[in-house]
Amino acid sequence: SQPLDLRLPTPGCYNDPERAGLDAKSVFDGMTEHLFFTLGKLAPTASRHDLYMALSYAVRDRLMMRYLATTEAMRAHPQKSVAYLSAEFLIGPQLNNNLLNLGIQQEAEAALRNFGIESLQQILDVEEEPGLGNGGLGRLAACYMESLASLKIPATGYGIRYEFGIFDQLIRDGWQVEITDKWLKGGWPWELPQPDEACFVGFGGRTESYIDDKGSYRSRWIPAEHAIGIPHDVPVLGYRVNICDRLRLWRADATESFDFYAFNIGDYYGAVEEKVGSETLSKVLYPNDGTDEGRRLRLKQQHFFVSCSLQDMLRSLDNRGLPVEDFPKYWTVQLNDTHPAIAVAELMRLLIDDRHMDWDKAWDITSRSVAYTNHTLLPEALEKWDLNLFSSLLPRHLELIYEINRRFLQQLRLRYPGNDAIQRKLSIIDEDGSKAVRMAHLATIGAHHVNGVAALHSDLVKTDLLPEFAELWPEKFTNVTNGVTPRRWVALANPELSTLLNEHIGEDWISNMENLRKLEERQNDQGFLEHWGNTKLSVKRKLASYIHRNTGVLVDPSTLFDVQVKRIHEYKRQHLNVLQVITQYLRIKNGQADGMAPRTVIFGGKAAPGYYMAKLIIRFINGIAETVNADPDMDGRLRVVFLPDYNVKLGEQVYPASDLSEQISTAGKEASGTGNMKFAMNGALTIGTLDGANVEIRELVGAENFFLFGKTVEEINDLKRSGYNPGAFINAMPELQEALRLIEMGHFSNGDSELFRPLLDNLTGHDPFFVMADFADYLRAQEAVSLAWTDRMHWNRMSLLNTARTGFFSSDRSIGEYCENIWNVGPLNVDITCDVR
Ligand code: 9GP
């Protein structure tokens, strides 16, 4: 086959920006055309949103050469590609990222000036972000896609195009109020719908046996209903490379959107019923609260996107004339948590039922293609599906799972003769209580590798979560510590720091974060350290003005910005932080606050709508903020802020402006964390427990540049074993008693002594996350923070060393490890250079 000629009408190459349409004039012309032809607007009357759309379309045009060249290279020279299956991709705003990766931020700004726009930021502010994820897990998937492209690895991220993403959060009277996230309302310019590549997916119905034309017995599934998945593709450009990967998000459509029979008999609503039913499939993202409500729909969503994606991968082999037996040679399928774990059964079904392969061959292909990442040890987040629900939706998959399980249990029987207990424990089917399908077991049995997301977490997966599996298949289990992309989280989010880095160590750090080590040479340079501190201060000023505009609270940028932003969850212990703030408040009130650093304590994060205690914690933070901020004694010493509607865009403002990063989860509960990495890269010091990736952060930055506190996993386990009694810890801490008494009296709730009672009862009674046990040590560590803050040069030095030594947490490093140790994939060469005629 002849390679396509990908030259643009104006032939160009990356080294020749004018010809490639990347100069300011071309961007301006592109915008003008899109305003006129795509948007139907005239430049003089165009709104900022119009200009955002026009610029985005013009930028998208400029991704196309790399995007199509990548597809074409994969067609002409097939090689292994990554399929990253994830129910969530929290990709954040797209415009600035694409400008940065193309290298045309200044050109775009120049083009905008011709439309009377002074700064690019004015247009970036208009962008609506797609909230297609809950938090860390979804954002990790987005960072990984960006790194895959930057490392030139061919990849597709497969997920769901939710019409409504994670809810928008309002704060009313201190409580969280959820508002539907209508992110598509203004049009979203970054996707390319591909209706001609739609896939059919079945649900429900029954299975039956039949004899095929070769005389063999086979099973087939006769689904009761179908949905169609329409792919919507989002180009994912790497940083200054020719590769542009793809995020393929499936939107559900009805198969028969209009029932003429129903319509003809006068049943208008009946006529559209099926359409409404199928289309709810991709309607809304589930908040991860583990509540049972609507779980049937959630399982349908999982099967829907997994089935579409696997069909798409098989079709890509067919289209290129590659044999299906070579699936593992061309695709490596990564399961991001258990949400896509149904892939193990679905790939078996597609191979056995549709492609008429025998079991052993199909299992060989499946188990050589699929790998699974575990992201949590929390039992409520490990998915189990009620057997009745599962069999009513996916009867054929259940048959296949029974057979996978039967063969697996036989293996176990041989290895552990007579050990019934181990069979019950490892079986895919949970038979204790009401029967259920354990998705983590299905994923573990079907995968060639299982990895945790930080060193400590991966150890706990082996010792606590799946110890018998780890004993059975030690070579399967491995670790890949999470990472975050330095493009978004430093270069884009923190232009002030980026400029400083570029001037002093060159620009290479953006694609090789280990180069940040060069900063260490400046650690004793007083002038540089001052510059370092001033850079941070200028970023803090911007956040202070955001806080004022959005909450009305005036904060002083010269105070220590002490920040905890993440989902609100008891295990993340925002309430531990608040109790510490109350102690500081009391010390100021009682004139015992000498040496205490003046602080602005900033919180942000959403609570799952069905998680009562998390919502009460938000109310608690706001109660304390109201009391503290209204008290003149606190002026210049303490401020508390809750930032509403924390999302990727807000994160980009918060991480660079932080001095102190609160990573205070109960040891053993946070699998990794990724916010902790974003803070440290941007020069914030961490106060944290030995949990998740905090352990590795501390090792890398040095114990002397990290404020450690709290019980270790072993100590927490000892406490559990010996019968933990929070009262004993409370009795030993008069300051804590006083704080709890004030809360109980309604001091932070306008005299309402009932409001926070459930929280108090939880802490003083059972205290499942050991807040009381860690309180004293946390307070001690906070005092060490205050002391360190008084010597600003020393603080700046610690801050610099945090940036210099956290290059390891670039997602380029994580993806490099996945490629090498799990996927066995390499880079793709895409040549877009052309004859300059
Ligand atoms: O809770 C973990 C978080 O610690 C981790 O950083 C993130 C990405 O690996 O995954 C989170 N897990 C989930 O959201 C659910 O399993």
Image (spheres, helix red, strand yellow):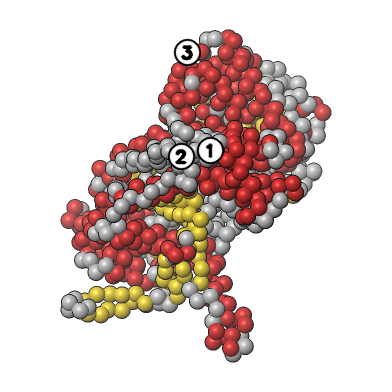
Q: Secondary structure at mark 3?
A: helix
Mark 1, other Cα within 10 Å: few <14 / some 14–19 / many ≥20: many
Q: Quadrant of the C terminus?
A: top left
Q: Earlier in the sequence, mark 3 or mark 2?
A: 2
The residue identified by callout 3 is 521
Q: Quadrant of the N terminus?
A: bottom left
Q: Position of residue 81 (x, y in %)?
A: 34, 48
Task: Name the residue tied to disc 2.
Answer: 12
Asked if residue 373 shows in the view, the reply is no
**Upstream in sequence: badge 3 or badge 1:** 1
x then y, percent, for residue 454: 41, 37
Dot 2, how many residues are within 10 Å of its Cα: few (below 14), some (14-19), or many (20+)? many
Q: Nearer the viewer, residue 660 or 410?
A: 660
Q: What element does badge 2 sit on? A: loop
Identify the residue under disc 1. 22
* Residue lying farthest to the bottom in this orientation: 265
> What's under tag 1, amino acid-wise?
Leu
